[in-house]
Every structure is written in C-alpha cells, then in structure tokens.
Image: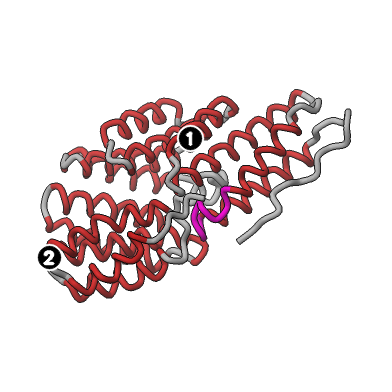
C-alpha cells in the first residue's frame, strides 16, 4: 500500500501556519492506520518522506504557538517512525527515532507513550527487566488513567515474562481499574489503539506468559481473553489480531489440544503472510518450537515457510 506522504512546502520566506500542522497530523494519522493494518514494513518509506518534509519545513518561521504545535506533531511522527522501524526489525533506527521524539515532545502523556514504546522494544528482544525500568520511568510523567492503564498492563507483562505471578496479577488488576476510569473515546490518536479489545489482547498476552513461566493452567484464562480480542479486533487492527491468534494457538498447544492449536494457527499464518511485520515472524518462533516439542506436525509445517521467508525490513 502506498501513500503520497509529502504535503506541499510553504513558498520561500513564508511562515508555517496551523494549516501545515493540521496537514502533518492528518498524514501521520493516515500512516499510523497503514501501520496497524499492514505492518511497519508497508509504510516506513512514506513515514521517512514525511519526516524529510518536516526537516525542510521546520526551517521556516512560525509564531511561538504554531512552533509549539509543530514540535508536538513532529514528536508524534518520530514516535510512529520508531514504531514502524521496530515492527520491521530495525531496532537501532527505532531507538534513534524514539530519542528524537522525546526531544520534540512536550505533552507529558506523549512522553510517557514514547517511553512505553521504548520499553516494548526491550520486552520484544527478551529484556523484561530493562522494559520494566522504562515503563516505570514513563509512569513518573503519565497523567491520564488511559496512559496509566497501558503502563500497568505492560509492567504486568514484564513480571509475567519473569515468572513473577503475584506482581503480574496485581498490575493486571490495576490496568483494568485504570482503564475503567479512563476516557477511552477521548484518547489522543497515538494512544487510541488501546481500547477494550487491546486490553483483552494484553490480558491474554500476560496470561500466556504466566502459562509458559509459572503454570500451564493460566492458558485457560489466556484463551478466554484472546478469543475476546480476536472477535473484537477490526480489519484495521489486523496486526494485533495476528498476534492474538498466534498466542491463542500457543495456549491450545500448552493445554495439549493440537487440533484447536492448528485451527488458530491456520488463521494466524494466513494473516501473518499479509502483514509486513518482523515482529509477527518472531512471535511465531515460540509457537513453532512448542509445536516441534509436542510433535504437532501440521502446525509446525504450517509455520516453517514463514520463518524462512525473506524479511520485510526493507
């Protein structure tokens, strides 16, 4: 999927106005939607083109108020650039964009959201302790119940990955409490992904980690939460639905139900093939290993071609 992500620059010696800031935010929102639906590999080039426009436009004069709004919009775009790089498997580029986003960000919840994204990179690469530190740092500046729900859920995930059941469940409960008090409909566009369906997906992810690190019986509540997430995710959130299906398949395997695991695996693999996401491939690896360990041949053979396919990190 392709977008023309380069709005017209102001004429020489003219000023940046609110119209340019609004245009930038509209373009960022459109590219964020492409990322959710098709993966970071599908729109990284367009995001970079829009950042190039920002570099040129920022040299133009602007009122103090417009300059402040423009900086905020650029921070949001760098946060998206970091996320698309992360999703494409480019951790170094992701880190660079997140640091630039922090330089431009002024909204405290946006700062917290950027640090949350930095923490997710650590968590994805097997560093739950480092991720937990980043989420706690984000919590210091977080203001809204919605942001605190995101951070509590992700801290719970870290503890679950480390096999720490008590803090994981306590923080999961806090995440649900914060979410119940949040203004979800009024969430800013860079945090709007975290709705009731994503909370269910996160809940399923936390229970999945506990099933792997503490007790396989946690696979049962994981399946309940993941089924809720899968049924609620719209096509616009295809990547998140793919992740939930992968976890769903894994939990069925942990309970010894190879047929249900294969059924969920078929759906996961079909969607993973349509999403340009290196993260989807990495999330298939533990499912493939578990299928191999349990001699679930059908599921293992289903996943293998995706693991050896060329990377989408172009």
Quarter of the rendering containing residue 59: top right
The number of numbered badges drawn on the structure is 2
Q: Is residue 105 above or below residue 5?
A: above
Expressed as whole percent of the image width and height from the top left, the position of residue 14 reads 88, 31
Q: Residue at x 25, y 66 (%)?
A: 249
Left or right, 290 with reference to 8: left
Expressed as whole percent of the image width and height from the top left, the position of residue 230 reads 37, 65
Expressed as whole percent of the image width and height from the top left, the position of residue 200 reads 34, 56
Q: Residue at x 51, y 39 (%)?
A: 82
Which residue, given by chain and number where applicable, does mark 1 sit on?
A: 114
Label 2: which secondary element: loop
Residue 294 disc label:
2
Left or right, 51 with reference to 99: right
Colouring chosen for the image of the structure: secondary structure
Please report the bounds of the magenta region as a residue range: 36-44
Q: Is residue 99 above or below residue 219?
A: above
Residue 160, visible in the rendered structure: yes
Q: Residues within 10 Å of mark 1 (few under 14, many from 20)?
A: many
Quarter of the rendering containing residue 301: bottom left
Expressed as whole percent of the image width and height from the top left, the position of residue 149 reads 38, 42
Q: Residue at x 45, y 27 (%)?
A: 141
Q: How far separated are the C-alphas under marks 2 and 1?
A: 39 Å
Left or right, 207 with reference to 266: left
- From the image, which quarter does the N terminus lie in? bottom right
* Marked residue nearer the N-terminal end (2 or 1): 1
Whether the magenta-drawn stretch holds residue 241 is answered as: no
Q: Nearer the viewer, residue 92 or 251?
A: 92
């Amino acid at each position: 999927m392709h977008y023309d992500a380069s709005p017209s620059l102001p004429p020489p010696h003219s000023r940046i106005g609110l119209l340019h800031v609004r245009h930038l935010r509209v373009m960022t929102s459109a590219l964020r939607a492409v990322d959710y639906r098709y993966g970071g590999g599908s729109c990284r080039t367009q995001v970079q083109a829009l950042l190039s426009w920002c570099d040129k436009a920022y040299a133009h004069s602007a009122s103090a108020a417009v300059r402040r709004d423009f900086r905020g919009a650029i921070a949001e775009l760098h946060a998206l650039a970091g996320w698309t790089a992360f999703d494409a498997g480019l951790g170094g580029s992701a880190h660079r964009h997140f640091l630039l986003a922090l330089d431009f960000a002024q909204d405290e919840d946006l700062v917290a959201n950027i640090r949350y994204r930095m923490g997710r990179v650590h968590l994805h690469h097997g560093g739950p302790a480092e991720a937990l530190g980043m989420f706690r740092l984000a919590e210091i500046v977080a203001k809204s119940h919605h942001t605190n729900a995101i951070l509590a859920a992700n801290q719970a995930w870290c503890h679950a990955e480390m096999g720490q059941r008590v803090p994981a469940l306590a923080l999961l409960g806090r995440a649900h409490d914060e979410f119940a008090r949040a203004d979800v409909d009024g969430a800013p566009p860079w945090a709007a992904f975290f709705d009731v369906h994503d909370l269910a997906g996160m809940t399923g992810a936390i229970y999945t980690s506990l099933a792997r690190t503490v007790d396989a019986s946690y696979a049962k509540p994981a399946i309940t939460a993941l089924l809720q997430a899968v049924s609620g995710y719209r096509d616009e959130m295809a990547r998140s639905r793919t992740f939930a299906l992968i976890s769903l398949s894994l939990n069925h395997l942990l309970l010894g139900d190879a047929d249900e695991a294969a059924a969920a695996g078929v759906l996961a693999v079909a969607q993973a093939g349509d999403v340009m996401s290196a993260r989807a491939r990495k999330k298939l690896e533990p499912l493939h290993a578990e299928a191999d360990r349990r001699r679930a041949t059908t599921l293992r053979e289903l996943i293998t071609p995706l693991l050896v396919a060329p990377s989408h990190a172009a």
